[in-house]
């Protein structure tokens, strides 16, 4: 037992001796050190109370003694040489504490080898927060070109205009299972008020609760009718006119709907040949839910 | 002005201990619009006037031991009446506190459903304000405290509609004075106990809407209808609160990571509606009708998540998550309708909707070789929906039968990642899902998705390509719905030299959906027809930044999005799908939206730059021209940096 303890102490002591401190790093890496006091990781140096392995450069890059003697990527932890999982493990050594990163191991990004260093630039971040490699919108567009197209459409949430960011609705570190649709999809979507669709963060008047809920809104979520990023159709609708959107569900077919006998069809007074009946929401104005009318008239 | 004085005083005060970076861009923005200005305001909305286009201010303590703070970051955008204004502020002192503020205001204009020759009739011309404040005490310690406040408000004018006085009556436009506000207060704490971190938060969300609706004498939307309106007033205050709890626990060890999250939100809303409508109705004559409803709605929501991540080997990660979601919406509404001539009617309504979902997901991620990684997963969801509908109308007897249905989704994901050479990454992913009882015909039932992505990065050259196919086929006995979407996208950016950079991207989004419909024409039911929708969207973006001289930068760019539809030249199509012209005209909606732009920046002195920009917006529907517009917008500004 004593032998083991002595061996352990010797190992710790040896490792501690391998740390040279950030002052040694700045001799060669002056360009990085010059502005490092603006970096959030500078806190570990400013603190002066952290262990050597949690302080400054060596908290991420490991003991620097060998590197100081023989500078090369092989003598230090160089993130450009690490495998994706190694990068993730290195960052999560300190950054695993946040609730927002609780699902990072199972996030779509991690599964596709998009890890911390793909989006964050620790030493050369051009943006004031979160050490992002580019401004957030451009960063996401780097891979999600199709989403860029959606936000370039005439009807869209104002992301390109700088009014919103992707992280208003999404958690790039992975999210908990959604509470709408069938729980396993969609992924990477952040939740409002701890368990609701992110749309309701801003569109709180649609939140309810209503005495007469439009059940699909609660069951399948807003994206049953709307395209959240952008659309060629007004009000971000999935179809250019509203009546086809309504009638594709209200066709009485199958075992759909609240009563499992198909979603109710229109009554015979709805003459679809007459243009006035092609504007469903002119009469059914409270289509997201109503307190005063089961047919959403008021 | 106050902002400038604040910055100057702080700058002067702290020059010796802090590094200060500061810049303002002030200038004049202009816009000229031809065509439908309302549509322009809905989509772009830049106007004329002097603006603080951007500002950026940072103060950083050089040794990390500032007296009151170590960092201030303040950014603003569009202040002075741009339609998209925002400001962010961060103040922090290492180890002691961190405060983040985000304020945004959007001039939100929406002309309603006016595209594609639709009548619209709903309009919003409002201002949307949002602000978030978050304060953390001891952000780097094991004992943290959280305080937060969020406010949202929407105010302005709107147009809505009402149908009077019975199901065959006319529709009338109403003026709405929109007043909505939301406040959320949060308090929380995080601490560590026996190596397990516990994070809890208690929040309260208050929402209130007090939007009155009114109308004077109005003949109605349909000239042939004899229903008329003399006056209309409706007030409907709608107030409520949604208090919530969130508790999360985390524990990390070398080979296992565990976290759990539990939430409970108890929402309730109380409401009153008082509506008076005076007019004449066909078949009835003069009417003086008053409707009063009161009541409340409740929606308690409880969720739980538990995630276990195992790391049995350095190359292998296994993650399992179980989640439970339970919501119950119920409420009552007392409805009184007075015909002031006959003094009649007193009815009660009630509905209940309960959703319980249990899901379990297991994902396995394995780095088989240095250049090959694979992952796979199985996801299971079980959703039970309970429903009771009880509403009594003169023509509908109360229905108090409870209904219950269960839907199970089994889905599998799989994918692999290749890195044959260092700068190149290829990923392939697939998902297949089978749901046995979706809630609506358009929901996912038998779906599969296939995707592939390529990323190449070598020095300053980045290229990526992406393709994804989403298919959902949902057949039932009388009707069917299917959706086929395919996306192809490619993007490249390159900076061959410091003075030159390019960025270009193209994507094609193809969508074809087909859904069964059942409708009436002149009291005759039409069955067995299909609603079709074809969309072929091509999107291009090109940009180039050129440092023309030591003093001048130029950026030129072009964005174009075009839906070519299904290739038809008139909205009535070739007679496919439904025989009704309205359905044929809704099958495709070709339009183009383009926006070329150019920006110049010239350095006048070390601290001052002159900027100018121009951007054109052109919106053009192929079949209808009522909504089309073209706009020339631009700005000229001076950027001061300190």
Image (cartoon, rainbow, N blue to C red):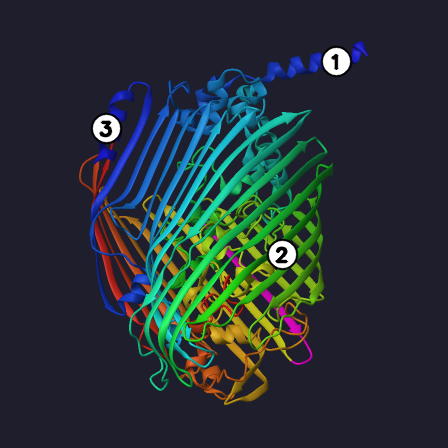
SS class, disc 1? helix
Q: Chain of mark 2?
A: B
A206 horizontally vs B597: left or right: right
On screen, residue B37 above or below B519: above
SS class, disc 2? strand
Q: Give the residue number, with chain letter if any, for mark 2.
A: B428
Residue positioned 62% across, 34% down in the render:
A89
Mark 2–mark 3 Cα distance, whole angstroms, equals: 54 Å
Image quarter in which the N terminus of chain A is found:
top right
User: Residue B27, position in %: x, y?
Assistant: 20, 46
Image quarter in which the C terminus of chain A is found:
bottom left
Q: Give the residue number, with chain letter if any, for mark 1.
A: A7
Return the residue nearer the eye: B466 or A205: A205
Residue positioned 50% across, 37% down in the render:
B186
| Residue B12 seen anywhere in this rendered image of the structure | yes
Query: Of callouts 2 and 3, which one flags the residue occurring earlier in the amino acid sequence?
Result: 3
Tell me the number on the disc at residue B8: 3
SS class, disc 3? helix
Return the residue nearer the eye: B478 or A53: B478
Q: Is disc 1 on the same chain as disc 2?
A: no
Q: Chain of mark 3?
A: B
Pointer 1 local density, CA inside 10 Å: few below 14, some 14–19, many at least 20: few
Q: Main secondary structure of the magenta part?
A: strand
Over which residues does the magenta segment extend? Answer: B461-478
Q: Chain of mark 1?
A: A
Return the residue nearer the eye: B627 or B588: B627
Mark 1–mark 3 Cα distance, whole angstroms, equals: 59 Å
């Amino acid at each position: 037992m004593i032998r083991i303890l002595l061996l352990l102490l010797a190992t710790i002591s040896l490792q501690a001796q391998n740390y040279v401190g950030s002052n040694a790093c700045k001799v060669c890496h002056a360009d990085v050190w010059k502005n490092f006091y603006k970096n959030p990781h500078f806190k570990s140096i400013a603190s002066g109370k952290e262990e050597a392995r949690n302080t400054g450069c060596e908290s991420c890059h490991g003991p620097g003694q060998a590197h100081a003697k023989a500078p090369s990527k092989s003598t230090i932890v160089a993130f450009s040489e690490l495998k994706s999982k190694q990068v993730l493990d290195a960052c999560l050594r300190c950054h695993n504490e946040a609730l927002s990163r609780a699902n990072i191991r199972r996030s779509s990004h991690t599964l596709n080898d998009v890890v911390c260093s793909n989006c964050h630039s620790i030493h050369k971040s051009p943006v004031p927060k979160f050490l992002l490699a580019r401004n957030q919108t451009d960063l996401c567009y780097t891979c999600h070109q199709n989403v860029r197209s959606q936000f370039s459409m005439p009807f869209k949430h104002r992301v390109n205009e700088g009014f919103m960011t992707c992280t208003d609705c999404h958690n790039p570190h992975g999210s908990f299972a959604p509470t709408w649709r069938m729980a396993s999809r969609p992924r990477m979507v952040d939740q409002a008020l701890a368990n609701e669709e992110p749309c309701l963060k801003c569109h709180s008047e649609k939140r309810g609760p209503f005495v007469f809920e439009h059940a699909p809104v609660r069951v399948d979520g807003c994206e049953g009718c709307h395209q959240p990023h952008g659309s060629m159709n007004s009000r971000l609708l999935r179809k250019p006119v509203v009546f086809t959107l309504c009638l594709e569900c209200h066709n009485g077919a199958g075992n759909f709907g609240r009563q499992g006998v198909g979603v109710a069809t229109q009554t015979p007074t709805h003459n679809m040949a007459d243009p006035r009946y092609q504007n469903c929401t002119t009469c059914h104005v409270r289509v997201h839910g109503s307190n005063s009318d089961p047919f959403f008239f008021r | 002005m106050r902002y400038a004085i604040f910055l100057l005083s702080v700058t002067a005060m702290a020059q010796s201990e802090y590094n200060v970076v500061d810049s303002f861009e002030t200038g004049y923005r202009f816009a000229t619009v031809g065509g439908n200005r309302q549509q322009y305001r809905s989509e772009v909305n830049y106007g004329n006037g002097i603006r603080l286009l951007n500002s950026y201010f940072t103060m950083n303590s050089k040794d990390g031991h500032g007296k009151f703070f170590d960092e201030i970051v303040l950014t603003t955008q569009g202040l002075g009446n741009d339609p998209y204004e925002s400001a962010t502020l961060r103040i922090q002192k290492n180890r002691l506190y961190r405060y983040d503020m985000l304020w945004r205001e959007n001039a939100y204009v929406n002309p309603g459903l006016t595209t594609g020759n639709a009548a619209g009739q709903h309009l919003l011309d409002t201002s949307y304000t949002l602000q978030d404040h978050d304060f953390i005490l001891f952000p780097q310690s094991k004992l943290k405290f959280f305080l937060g406040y969020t406010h949202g408000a929407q105010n302005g004018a709107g147009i809505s509609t009402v149908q009077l006085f019975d199901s065959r009556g006319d529709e009338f436009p109403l003026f709405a004075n929109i007043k909505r506000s939301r406040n959320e207060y949060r308090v929380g704490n995080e601490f560590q106990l026996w190596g397990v971190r516990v994070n809890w938060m208690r929040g309260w969300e208050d929402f209130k809407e007090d939007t009155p609706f009114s109308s004077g004498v109005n003949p109605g939307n349909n000239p042939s209808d004899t229903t008329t309106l003399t006056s209309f007033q409706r007030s409907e205050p709608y107030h409520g609160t949604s208090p919530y709890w969130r508790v999360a626990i985390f524990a990390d060890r070398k080979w296992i990571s565990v976290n759990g999250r539990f939430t409970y939100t108890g929402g309730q809303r109380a409401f009153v509606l008082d509506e008076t409508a005076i007019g004449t109705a066909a078949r009835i004559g003069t009417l003086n009708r008053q409707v009063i409803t009161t009541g409340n709605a409740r929606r308690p929501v409880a969720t739980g998540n538990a995630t276990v991540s195992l790391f049995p080997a350095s190359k292998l990660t296994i993650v399992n998550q179980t989640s439970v979601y339970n919501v119950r919406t119920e409420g009552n509404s007392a409805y009184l309708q007075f015909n002031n001539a006959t003094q009649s009617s007193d009815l009660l309504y009630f509905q209940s909707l309960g959703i319980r979902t249990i899901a379990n997901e297991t994902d396995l991620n394995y780095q088989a070789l240095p250049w090959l990684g694979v992952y796979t997963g199985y996801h299971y969801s079980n959703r039970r929906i309970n429903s009771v509908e009880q509403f009594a109308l003169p023509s509908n007897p109360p229905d108090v039968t409870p209904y219950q249905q269960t839907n199970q989704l089994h889905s599998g994901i799989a994918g692999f990642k290749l890195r044959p050479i260092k700068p190149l990454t290829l990923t392939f992913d697939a998902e297949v899902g089978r749901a046995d009882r979706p809630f609506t015909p358009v929901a996912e039932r038998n779906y599969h998705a296939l995707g592939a992505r390529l990323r190449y990065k070598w020095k300053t050259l980045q290229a990526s390509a992406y393709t994804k196919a989403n298919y959902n086929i949902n057949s039932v006995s009388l009707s069917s719905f299917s959706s086929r979407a395919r996306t192809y996208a490619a993007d490249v950016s390159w900076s061959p030299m410091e003075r030159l950079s390019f960025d270009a991207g193209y994507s094609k989004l193809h969508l074809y959906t087909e859904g069964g419909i059942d409708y009436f024409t002149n009291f005759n039911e039409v069955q067995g027809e299909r609603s079709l929708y074809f969309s072929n969207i091509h999107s291009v973006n090109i940009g180039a930044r050129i440092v023309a001289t030591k003093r001048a930068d130029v950026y030129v760019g072009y964005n174009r999005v075009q839906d070519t539809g299904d290739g038809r030249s008139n909205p009535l199509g070739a007679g496919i799908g439904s025989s009704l012209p309205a359905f044929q005209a809704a099958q495709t909606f070709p339009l183009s939206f383009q926006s070329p732009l150019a920006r110049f920046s010239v350095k006048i002195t070390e601290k001052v730059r002159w900027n100018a920009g121009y951007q054109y917006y052109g919106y053009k529907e192929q079949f209808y021209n009522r909504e089309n517009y073209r706009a020339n917008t631009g700005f000229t500004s001076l950027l001061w940096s300190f």
